[in-house]
Amino acid sequence: MRGSAGLESDRNAALLTDLYQLTMLQAYWREGLEGRAAFSLFFRRLSPSRNYLIACGLDDVLHYLEELRFTEEALDHLRGLGCFGGPFLDWLAELRFTGDVYAMPEGTPVFPHEPLLEVEAPIGEAQLVESFLINQVHLQTVLASKGARVVAAARGRKVVDFAMRRMHGTDAALKGARAFYIAGVDATSNVLAGKLYGIPVSGTMAHSYVQAHEEELDGFREFLRLYPDTILLVDTYDTLEGVRKVVQLARELGSDFAARGIRLDSGDLATLARRAREILDAAGLDAVEIFASGLLDEHGIARLVEQGAPITGFGVGTRMGVSDDLPAIDLVYKLTEYGGVGRRKLSPDKATLPGRKQVFRIESGGAAERDVLAGRGESLPGRPLLHPVMKSGERLASASETIEEVRARAAEEIAKLPARLRALEVADPPYHVEVSEALRAEAERAATG
C-alpha cells in the first residue's frame, strides 16, 4: 500500500505550480530575460449573484513568497522529469523571491479590473508564483465573499461555520474557516482552524449520539451531565416531541438545568421554531435559544429572518463552504509592464490595461460612491487602496496583521458600501468603477505600439 503523499508545506510549496511556469522560467533563464516585470492579479467581471467581492488570501501569499525555495528533494524531482537542464537546476537551487508586492488589505471590497495585488520582480520570479497566488487568493476571496452574504442575511444573529466536512479538501477547510471569520462569521466547528488562526470554535451534538441511547431523553440527560450549558439537537425523531423532552428534563433538573438552547436541523424551520418557542416559553424557558441548521445559505436565512422565525443563530455548512451558487470567479494574473514599458493583452473580452496601478475610492460622508482605476504614479482625489506590503522579498511590518484587525476592517469597509450593494439582490445600478484619463491614454499608446 502506498504511503500518503503528504500535504503542501514550506518544503514543497515551490512545486505547487503548473509545469508551464517552470518551463517558461527555464526559457527566460536561457534567453537571459531578467528585466523587471509587473503582474496584476484581478478578476474581469462580477457574477449577477454578487455585487462586490472581499479581498482575502494575502497573508498566505506573503508567507509563500518569503519562504519560496527549491529543496534538494524538489530539484531531484524536477531532474527526473527530463525536461530541465543541470545548469538551470543549479540556478534554481539559489532562487529566492526578491520582488515587491502592492496589495489591497484583506477585507477590502473589490470590483472588476481592480488589482487585488500587484507583483513587481524580475520576470522569472514574478511568472513562477502565478499559480500559487491565484490558487490562494481565489479560494479565500470566493469564500469570504460568500460568508459576507450569509452574515448580511442573518442581520446580527450568530452564524457558525459548519462547512468543513463537505469542503474541497483540507486546505480549503482551513483557509475557508479563516475567510469566513474575516467576513463576519462568528465561530467555526473546525478545531484545527481554531488553533491555527485563533478563531472561536463552536459545536453541539450529532444525531448519532442521540440514537446511541435507548431513549432520546437519556441522551439529553447524559450530555447535559457532561456539558450543562450545551445546545441540544431535538429533531432526531419527532422535533416537537424532542422539545417537550427538553422541558421535561428542565423540570427534572430544576435550578441545575442550564442548557443554552435547542437546535433544529430539518423540516419547516420557521414553523418548527415558532412552535418550539411556544412550548419553551410556556414552560418558563424563555432563556433557551433556538439555533437552526440544515442546508442553509444566505437566501434561506433571509427568508427565515423575514418570516420572523424566533431563531437566534445559524449553523451554515455545505452551501457556504463550497459557495455553491458561485464556486469560481474569473481571477487572472497578467503581465502589465516589462522593462519599464507598459504591456497589454488585446484578446477579445480579455483585454488588459498597461502598467502598474492604483485604485482610488471616492467617498462622501464616510460612504463609498465610486472607484477610479488609475496608474500607480497618479495622484487623484479619493482614498488609495493599494499599499506596499512586501519589499525586496520581505514582508513589511505594516502587512503583519492579526485576524481580528482584518475582521474589523472587513466589517468597517462593508458598512461603507451603499445599501444596494450590501443587499442580496442585484444592485441597480451596480457600483461604478471608472478608468482615469491618463490610464486610458496609456492603454491606447500601448495598443498601437
Image (cartoon, helix red, strand yellow):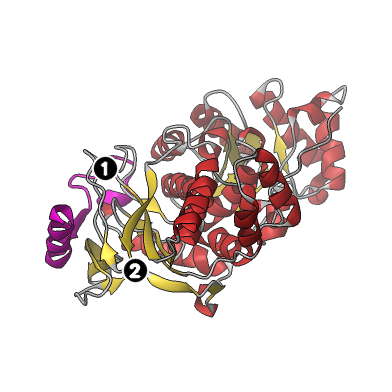
Could you say where residue 423 lies in the image, as x and y percent from the top left? 32, 46
Residue 446 percent coordinates (x, y):
18, 58
Label located before the other in sequence (2 or 1): 1
Query: For the point 49% across and 31% down, which residue is it?
Result: 270
Quarter the N terminus occupies: top right
Q: List x then y, in percent, for residue 299.
A: 41, 35
Residue 350 image label: 1
Query: Does residue 98 lie above or below 284 as drawn?
Result: below
Query: Over which residues does the magenta segment extend?
Result: 420-449
Task: Residue at 38%, 38% (x, y): give it.
Answer: 306
Q: Residues within 10 Å of mark 1 (few under 14, many from 20)?
A: few
Find disc 2 in the rendering and name its residue.
Answer: 385
- How many discs appear? 2
Q: Residue at x 87, y 38 (%)?
A: 222
Q: Is residue 49 above or below residue 405?
A: above
Identified at 50% across, 77% down, the residue is 398
Instruction: For residue 287, say whether it is visible.
Output: no
What is the crowding at mark 2: few (fewer than 14 residues within 10 Å), some, or many (at least 20)?
many
Mark 2 near mark 1, Cβ–Cβ under 8 Å?
Answer: no
Front residue of 130 and 209: 130
Measured as percent of width and height from the top left, residue 14 is found at 62, 53
Would residue 198 be counted in the magenta stretch?
no
In the rendered structure, the answer to whether residue 170 lies left or right of residue 225 reads left
Q: In the rendered view of the protein, which quadrant contains the C terminus?
A: bottom left
Q: Is residue 109 visible?
A: yes
Instruction: Reply above or below: 362 against 207.
Output: below
C-alpha distance separating marks 2 and 1: 24 Å
* Image depth: mark 2 or mark 1 in front: 1
